[in-house]
């Protein structure tokens, strides 16, 4: 019961107050773990330790309820030890836990799967990243930040790109060299693999003055990225958050390369887990 319904096992054994206290501890533990994961330079080992902490709490609840049940076996039942009370508490825990998880996704951090290779090699297709939702004010962005944003296409997944231009700046691209206010931006993350597409000129753009309520993004994999060169500047209203870390990595294998809607999970890339992106 404790593995599935939080501190329900404690209530079942007649320790209602203990169950409520443990539920409150677990409720505060979740956002704290997310916050530490997003903002601390944990690396792979630290990420694994935090994951173990998250898994250890429900196991502790179950073990604690087991020993309480052994110690209090055969005692008289209390008024709240009824089947309908357990059902009601289970529903309350489910609703409350979902509300806490929604608040964490909305205000602390959100997970996101990157399906495309526009940010390769920094972020590869199949990487699962954590998006910092605490940084929700787009005008605090800095050049070089990796951000998640809405592409403006209905029902399209969030896009992940690197900020290249800020509001009020003039951006221009000449022969794949990025100029910001006439000064070349030395972006060490940019790669130029494959040949340039023939149907659109990605090597030259602008000059364009970025509006005061927008920012300009580019993908690291410049010759395959559908970024602001095609989409235009990104409005602040479409900003979703800063990308902080890769917490899981598993490529997508397409049995039919012409059909990208069906894929199989590839081998886990353990060396990418815990990689910081800020």
Image (cartoon, rainbow, N blue to C red):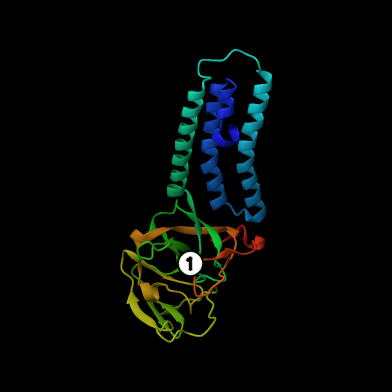
Answer above or below: position of 31 versus 148: above
Residue at horizontal 49%, vertical 57%?
A: 112
According to the picture, the residue beneath numbered tag 1 turns out to be 261
Q: State how many labels appear.
A: 1
Q: Work out which residue is located at the far top of the displayed protein and give it.
A: 76
Answer above or below: position of 271 versus 171: above
Judge by depth and name the residue closer to the eye, 200 or 9.
Answer: 9
Q: For the residue carrying disc 1, how many other residues have a C-alpha within 10 Å: few (<14), some (14-19), or many (20+)?
A: few
What is the quadrant of the N terminus in the image?
A: top right
Answer above or below: position of 23 versus 116: above
Residue at horizontal 34%, vertical 65%?
A: 214
At which x and y percent is residue 278?
53, 61
Judge by depth and name the residue closer to the eye, 216 or 249.
Answer: 249
The answer to whether residue 228 is seen in the rendering is yes
Q: In the drawing, does residue 66 fall left or right of residue 145?
A: right
The answer to whether residue 170 is seen in the rendering is no
Residue at horizontal 48%, vertical 66%?
A: 261
Q: In the drawing, does residue 245 fall left or right of residue 185?
A: right
- The image quarter containing residue 234 is bottom left
Answer above or below: position of 127 versus 206: above
Residue at horizontal 58%, vertical 26%?
A: 10
Q: In the drawing, does residue 264 fall left or right of residue 229?
A: right
Judge by depth and name the residue closer to the eye, 188 or 46.
Answer: 46
At which x and y percent is residue 191?
54, 77
At which x and y percent is residue 203?
44, 83
At which x and y percent is residue 61?
62, 32
């Amino acid at each position: 019961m404790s593995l599935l319904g939080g501190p329900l096992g404690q209530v079942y054994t007649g320790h209602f107050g203990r169950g409520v206290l443990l539920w409150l501890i677990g409720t505060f533990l979740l956002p704290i773990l997310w916050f530490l994961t997003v903002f601390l330079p944990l690396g792979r080992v630290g990420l694994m330790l935090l994951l173990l902490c998250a898994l250890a709490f429900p196991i502790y609840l179950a073990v604690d309820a087991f020993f309480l049940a052994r110690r209090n076996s055969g005692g008289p039942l209390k008024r709240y030890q009824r089947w309908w009370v357990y059902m009601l508490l289970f529903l309350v825990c489910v609703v409350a836990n979902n509300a806490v998880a929604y608040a964490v996704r909305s205000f602390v951090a959100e997970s996101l799967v990157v399906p495309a290779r526009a940010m390769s090699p920094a972020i590869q297709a199949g990487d699962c990243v954590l998006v910092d939702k605490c940084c929700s004010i787009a005008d605090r962005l800095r050049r070089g930040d990796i951000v998640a944003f809405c592409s403006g296409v209905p029902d399209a997944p969030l896009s992940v790109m690197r900020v290249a231009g800020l509001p009020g700046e003039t951006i221009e691209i000449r022969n794949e060299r990025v100029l910001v206010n006439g000064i070349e931006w030395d972006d060490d993350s940019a790669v130029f693999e494959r040949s340039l597409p023939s149907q659109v000129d990605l090597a030259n753009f602008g000059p364009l003055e970025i509006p005061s309520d927008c920012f300009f993004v580019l993908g690291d994999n410049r010759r395959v990225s559908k970024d602001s060169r095609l989409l235009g500047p990104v409005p602040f209203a479409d900003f979703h958050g800063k990308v902080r870390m890769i917490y899981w990595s598993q490529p997508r294998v397409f049995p039919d390369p012409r059909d990208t809607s069906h894929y199989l999970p590839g081998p886990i890339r353990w060396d990418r887990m815990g990689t910081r992106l800020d």
